[in-house]
Image: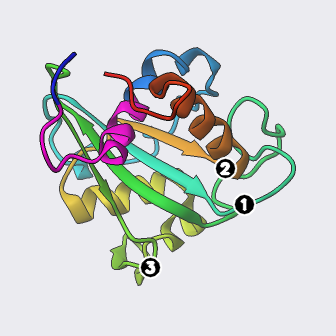
Amino acid sequence: APRRRAGRRPAVLLAPAGVVLVTQQLGSQVGRYPSVFAPIDPSSRPADTAGQTFLLMGTDTRSPEATTGTDAAPDAVFGSTRSDVIMVATIAQDGQSASIVSIPRDSWVDIPGHGKNKINAAFSYGGTQLMVQTLESLLRTRMDHVVMVDFEGFIALTASLIGHFCDNAGSIRA
């Protein structure tokens, strides 16, 4: 089994691993919204780079009904809530490394067309498209994919990750 480097925390490794798990193993079970990037002017977006960059968002809805994914009601309105968790994950082109950055939801930023506000207001003002524009402008990094999950989906994803990466004793598998 590979050795762990001193100072690495298992939780830090789970986040990028979770992105890979979602895209590779759960991808067929996730609702697809092909027009997420369509309304964004391509000339306003940062240049495409090697690897894949994911915008990961959790909504602040604790509804007993699904608000994201394939179980969401057909009339679910994206952007009707604020985003609670905002992360940007990047997986290197060779798949050998990954990084993840958490953006505090109360970060005061410029939201295109709306001036300064908390970053989670971008989702409320203009849904996923405005959140992508806001983050791309802030980070100068192109978002390639968007993953959005509500509270119930987060519980299911967490359980799946724990089951996939941990043995019965709760230890991380190599």
Bounds of the magenta segment = 4-19
Residue type at tag 1? Thr
Residue at 67% in and 36% down = 156
Please tell me the numbered disc located at residue 106. Answer: 3
Q: CA distance from mark 1 to mark 3?
A: 17 Å
| Left or right for 23, reference 74 | left
Compare marks 3 and 2 and give the one earlier in the sequence.
3
Q: Secondary structure at mark 2?
A: loop
Badge 1 density bin: few <14, some 14–19, many ≥20, Cα 10 Å: some
Query: Visible in this render: residue 105?
Result: yes
The spot of residue 171 in percent (x, y) is: 43, 33
The spot of residue 50 in percent (x, y) is: 13, 29
Residue type at tag 3? Asp
Q: Residue furthest front?
A: 169
Q: Main secondary structure of the magenta part?
A: helix
The spot of residue 3 in percent (x, y) is: 15, 27
Locate residue 73: give its quadrant.
Answer: top right
Locate residue 20: give its quadrant.
Answer: top left
The residue closer to the viewer here, 44 or 57, is: 57
The residue closer to the viewer here, 116 or 103, is: 103
Locate the N terminus and report the quarter of the image it occupies.
top left
Residue type at tag 2? Asp
Badge 3 density bin: few <14, some 14–19, many ≥20, Cα 10 Å: few
Query: Marks 2 and 1: CB-CB under 8 Å?
Result: yes
Please name the residue that numbered disc 1 is placed on. 61
| Left or right for 54, reference 58 | left
